Every structure is written in structure tokens, then in C-alpha cells.
Image: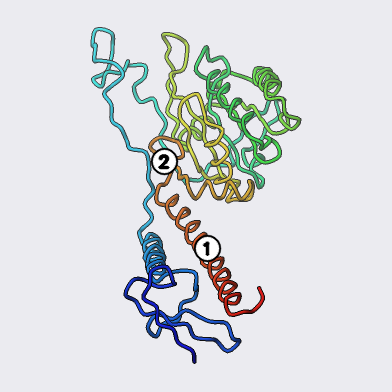
């Protein structure tokens, strides 16, 4: 066995470290530090220690518990200062808005046996719209002078902002909570919004329902939707938002307000479908983004992003080590007088 002692810097070892080259069984030399064989003759011992430390550090990240980095629940004061002379309640809200809101009933089952009338006047059960696809539910009333229109406009914008088609990948149910409204008004609303949606499957996938007060009340209670009729204005006081349900009729996601980000809307549909729709990219996004019930939005999960970055780094290091090893072996063979 041939042996060479090197103490010079830049000859394959650290200053003051004994490096030997020993021919392998096939005649190719391997670098040796002490009694340890180096896998990559092109790398120094210090490089190996750096790589090993980095790998241990990255792997330790995967031992940490998963923490969903949910958006902070920022508390704020009431929208209105208490003004008893105007009939406002103690919390600062007008009396007409007392007990108005949306309570999240996540994972609870919708009563699918409830009966309503569709836009053609036909009696239908909710179960008819749950057949293997996620369902978007909107509670509104068609004669609403402002807020309901804004909700439906916001939903239309979100639907137009994703590649999924209503009627193909998911269904949409708009249910009026005003028992005075009938199917003719529902039909006119459907024509208006389906025309704005401009998708071939829109008419078969977006349904506008009306119903009796008993069915409406049971549906609203099931989803946590609290509204109130104001006799003084002959209007309904209500909150704004939409809900996404699983194909089995369980409440999966809530979105508040009148605008819904297409990215969040798409992820909610993929989530509710149990990953039966969407692409691998959607699955990756769902790993990095988690639903925050307090905001009704999807927030970035920092720990999962770090883990994905760690995996990419480990993979890059492995590729680098293989490249350096191959390059070192080729160099050693050429120095020994062989061919590449």
C-alpha cells in the first residue's frame, strides 16, 4: 500500500492534518484522514464537518412540533360609541344590529332534508345539490338594497378568478332568508349573475332558492347565521359572508365580508373536496397555508415553509456531494495515469 504524508495547505487536507492516499481494489485512490476514508477526495475534512452540521441542523427542524402560524386575533373597540339617545346598545352597536353575526359551526352537518323552491318553482331538497362536489352556500335576500348585492358581486369575482367551474368542480347555492320572496325573483337574480359569471356550466352549477320561514330558520341556525327583520325600515339586518361545505354537507370553511380572495376561495374548495379536485400545486399550497377561523382566511404557516426549504437544501447538498465525489474520483484517476 502506497502512502503519502501531506501537511501542506491545498493538497486535500487541513493544515497539520495527516492525509494519505490508498489505492482501492480497482486501483483508484481514496483520500484518508487518520483511519477514516473520505467519500469525496475533492472535499476537505472541514467541508465534511460543515455539511454534517448543516444536515443535523436541518433535520432538527423536522423534530419541532407543527405550529399553525395563524393570524393574530387583533381586538378592537366597538365600531360605534354608545349613544343611548339614538337607541344604541351598551356595546356601541345600533339596536338593529344587536345579535347579528355569523357563528362558525365548523364540521357540523347541514340538515339536507330541508325543502326549498328553486328558481323554476320546483320543490327541492338540499340533498339534491350534494353529490360528490363541494358546495358554496350564500344566505342573502334578493331585494336587499345593498349588502347582499355586494356579497354576490364579491362571490362572482372570486368564482371568475379561479379555473374551477361552477357546475363542474363545485356547486353554488344562494338561499334567500326572506320568506316573502318567490321563485320569479330568484329566477331573475340567477339570470343576472349567471350572465355575469360567463362560464358555460354556470346555469347548471349556480342555484337560487327560496323557502318557507321554518326551513330558512333551520338552515340559518345550522350554519350559525344570525339575522333580524327591522320593521321600521322593512329590511333585514344581517352579516356578510359565505360558507364552503363538503360533498357530504359538513361546514368546512367560512369567509367574511364582501370580497373573497380567489386564492383562498380555491384552497377552500380543494380542502372541502378532500383533495379530490385541484392540482399538486394546490396540495403544496395547503401544506404552506392553513385556514384561520378567526379571520376566515388562509395564513402562511412559517414552520411548514421552513421544512420545505430544509428539504430543498438537503436535496441540494446531496446532489453537491455526489457531483464533488464524481469530480474527485475523475481527478484522482487522471493523476494516477488512467482515463476519465
Q: Please give the label number shown on residue 292.
A: 2
The residue where tag 1 is placed is 320
Local crowd size for mark 2, using a 10 Å CA cut-off: few (<14), some (14–19), many (≥20): some
State the image coordinates of residue 141 (x, y, percent, origin top left).
Answer: 55, 20
State the image coordinates of residue 165 (x, y, percent, origin top left).
Answer: 68, 35
Q: How many marks?
A: 2
Residue at figure coordinates x 28%, y 21% from the top left: 78
Residue 234, compared with residue 284, is above or below; it is above
- Kindly indicate the quadrant of the structure image that contains residue 335: bottom right
Which residue is at the front of the view, 308 or 54?
A: 54
Which residue is at the front of the view, 118 or 18?
A: 18
312 sits left or right of 48 in the view: right
Which residue is at the front of the view, 32 or 233?
A: 32
Residue at figure coordinates x 61%, y 38% from the top left: 126
- Secondary structure at numbered mark 1: helix
Q: Please give the label number shown on residue 249.
A: none
- Residue most extreme to the right: 200
Residue at figure coordinates x 43%, y 18% from the top left: 237
Residue 86, compared with residue 112, is above or below; it is above
State the image coordinates of residue 74 (x, y, percent, origin top left).
Answer: 30, 32
Amino acid at each position: 500500500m502506497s502512502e503519502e504524508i501531506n501537511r501542506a495547505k491545498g493538497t486535500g487536507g487541513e493544515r497539520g492534518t495527516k492525509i494519505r492516499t490508498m489505492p482501492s481494489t480497482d486501483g483508484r485512490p481514496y483520500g484518508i484522514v487518520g483511519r477514516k476514508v473520505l467519500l469525496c477526495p475533492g472535499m476537505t475534512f472541514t467541508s465534511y464537518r460543515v455539511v454534517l452540521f448543516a444536515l443535523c441542523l436541518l433535520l432538527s427542524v423536522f423534530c419541532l412540533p407543527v405550529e399553525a402560524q395563524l393570524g393574530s386575533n387583533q381586538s378592537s373597540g366597538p365600531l360605534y360609541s354608545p349613544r343611548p339617545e339614538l337607541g344604541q346598545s351598551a356595546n356601541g352597536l345600533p339596536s338593529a344590529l344587536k345579535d347579528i353575526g355569523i357563528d362558525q359551526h365548523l364540521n357540523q352537518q347541514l340538515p339536507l332534508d330541508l325543502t326549498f323552491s328553486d328558481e323554476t318553482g320546483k320543490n327541492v331538497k338540499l340533498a339534491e345539490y350534494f353529490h360528490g362536489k363541494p358546495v358554496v352556500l350564500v344566505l342573502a335576500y334578493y331585494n336587499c338594497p345593498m349588502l347582499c348585492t355586494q356579497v354576490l358581486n364579491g362571490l362572482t369575482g372570486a368564482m371568475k378568478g379561479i379555473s374551477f367551474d361552477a357546475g363542474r368542480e363545485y356547486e353554488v347555492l344562494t338561499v334567500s332568508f326572506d320568506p316573502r320572496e318567490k321563485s320569479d325573483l330568484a329566477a331573475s337574480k340567477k339570470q343576472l349573475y349567471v350572465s355575469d359569471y360567463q362560464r358555460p356550466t354556470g346555469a347548471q352549477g349556480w342555484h337560487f332558492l327560496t323557502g318557507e320561514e321554518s326551513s330558512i330558520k333551520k338552515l340559518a341556525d345550522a350554519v350559525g347565521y344570525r339575522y333580524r327583520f327591522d320593521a321600521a325600515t322593512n329590511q333585514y339586518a344581517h352579516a356578510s359572508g359565505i360558507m364552503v361545505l363538503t360533498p357530504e354537507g359538513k361546514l368546512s370553511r367560512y369567509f367574511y365580508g364582501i370580497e373573497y380572495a380567489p386564492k383562498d376561495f380555491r384552497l377552500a374548495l380543494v380542502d372541502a373536496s378532500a383533495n379530490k379536485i385541484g392540482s399538486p400545486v394546490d396540495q403544496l399550497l395547503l401544506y404552506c397555508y392553513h385556514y384561520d377561523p378567526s379571520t376566515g382566511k388562509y395564513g402562511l404557516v412559517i414552520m411548514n415553509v421552513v421544512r420545505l426549504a430544509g428539504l430543498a437544501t438537503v436535496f441540494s447538498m446531496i446532489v453537491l456531494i455526489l457531483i464533488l465525489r464524481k469530480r474527485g474520483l475523475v481527478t484522482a484517476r487522471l493523476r494516477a495515469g488512467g482515463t476519465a
